[in-house]
Image (cartoon, rainbow, N blue to C red):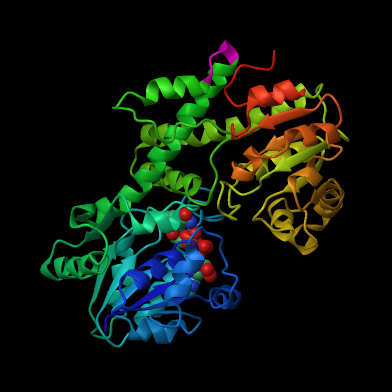
Amino acid sequence: MVKICCIGAGYVGGPTMAVIAVKCPSIEVAVVDISVSRIQAWNSDVLPIYEPGLDEVVKQCRGKNLFFSTDVERHVAEADIVFVSVNTPTKTRGLGAGKAADLTYWESAARMIADVSKSDKIVVEKSTVPVKTAEAIERILTHNSKGIKYQILSNPEFLAEGTAIQDLFNPDRVLIGGRETSDGRKAVETLKSVYAHWVPEDKILCTNLWSAELSKLAANAFLAQRISSVNAMSALCEATGADVAQVAHAIGTDSRIGPKFLKASVGFGGSCFQKDILNLIYICECNGLAEVAGYWRQVIKVNDYQKSRFVNRVVSSMFNTVAGKKVAILGFAFKKDTGDTRETAAIDVCKGLIGDKAHLRIYDPQVSEDQIQRDLALNKFEWDHPAHLQPAAREAAKQVSVVGDAYEASKGAHAVCVMTEWEEFKGLDYGRIYEGMQKPAFVFDGRNVVDVEKLREIGFIVYSIGKPLDP
Ligand code: NAD
């Protein structure tokens, strides 16, 4: 029986391996992590991440050919194929701080693989890494190899949170990059045979290592660039009376452009887009390509601009101050169908409003109060703050409460801000919400999900991204 081990039981490692296990009953899959609480959750009824369809897949094979464990070394030693799906955040200090990928977790995983391995292995980069990382990993493994042979493959993951299971079952493509040697080609064939259990052959793309590594960064940069392009257009629409939805439809029907990823919003979030573009910028700079770096930097700048533009719109619409006013925040996750709040636009918007002394009541169906407090740095964990910032954090904490539903959030509020496109926000009883609010009652829709006409009929003053302003 082929044995797979995946190091890192996060948003990628967990779902990806669960799908491999369910599609390949003849393969034993172990997902390992240094986080005891995460592994406990994977082994419980309440999985550590919310993802539609994930519970069913995990339940189908957990304990049969899918195992979650903290015994990292044993499972790595026993595996034929080791996926590495650890986090690769942006470096916060030292060389490349604020841009370069922090490969600390990757390096420690590679050193551990070298330490515990007793048989030849295929090591698969599942994490998103800078181009040429495989070379560094090879160096760590071969210099510590004790005669063991390693083949490094790049197999970046293209799933999107919220649709991860659907994406994994029916991927647009699976990308495998390997060395163009006979051992390299053999390793590619081995990994290909795993995916071939359910992915049609023409959807498995094989490239050289560097193309595969770079393709993942390029894919995220292109996706984020589309969002920034339509968001940049949304600002112009507001200034001119055009409607961004109409413009997006008009350009999206051009088959060269296509309709997807053309929805204007308060800005992209999530753990990947910004981090991967920063990483790309850093790689460009390291290769002396300042102009190319500047091109990609603009994608992030427009995203930041979109978030601050939204905050400014809220404040300026409410007679230039939100001090002491109550604002309901509907949604905190970076998109619907996930509880993930990493880099969510809601953080910047909430911080902007808190800075202007608004009182926020936040509701998200999947994000806990604890998580929101951490994200806004308002938590009870005061040791997170240097002493001189603690009074401000305590003060800000008094301005924020987290509540159990949208009606509670909006009761007595001067304004509602929609930050996540959860389906339930489309179907709310806005008449009831209006009744309970201060007047004039404002709705600022950061995801363009509400029915603007209907809300205006009820009496709301509505602001939607890139749409003609309330007359
Ligand atoms: P995550 O933070 O949810 O999970 C990473 C896990 O790795 C954590 O649980 C951490 O405890 C564990 N870990 C770190 N070092 C370890 C070690 N030495 N041994 C064992 N476990 C270790 O991250 P994620 O969202 O799953 O992302 C993982 C990678 O996949 C990143 O490079 C990310 O850019 C990439 N990616 C993410 C997504 C996404 O939507 N989240 C999509 C595609 C690619």
Q: Is residue 107 above or below residue 89?
A: below
Q: Foreground: 321 or 285?
A: 321
**Location of residue 253 (image quadrant):** top left
Give me the residue at 58% from left, 78% from top: 40
**Is 17 on the left or on the right of 244, as rendered?**
left
**Location of residue 119 (image quadrant):** bottom left
Q: Main secondary structure of the magenta part?
A: loop
Q: Is residue 189 above or below residue 117?
A: above
**Location of residue 152 (image quadrant):** bottom left
Residue 222 image offset from top left, x and y in percent: 38, 38
Q: Foreground: 355 or 114?
A: 355
Residue 129 image offset from top left, x and y in percent: 39, 57
The verdict on residue 85 being magenta is no
Q: Would you say residue 385 is visible in this rendering?
A: yes
The verdict on residue 240 being magenta is yes
Give me the residue at 82% from left, 31% from top: 322
Give me the residue at 84% from left, 45% from top: 399
The quarter in which the N terminus is drawn is bottom left
Magenta range: 239-243
Count of marks, rendered view = 0
Residue 184 image offset from top left, x and y in percent: 17, 67
**Is 287 on the left or on the right of 94, as rendered?**
left
Q: Is residue 26 above or below residue 353?
A: below
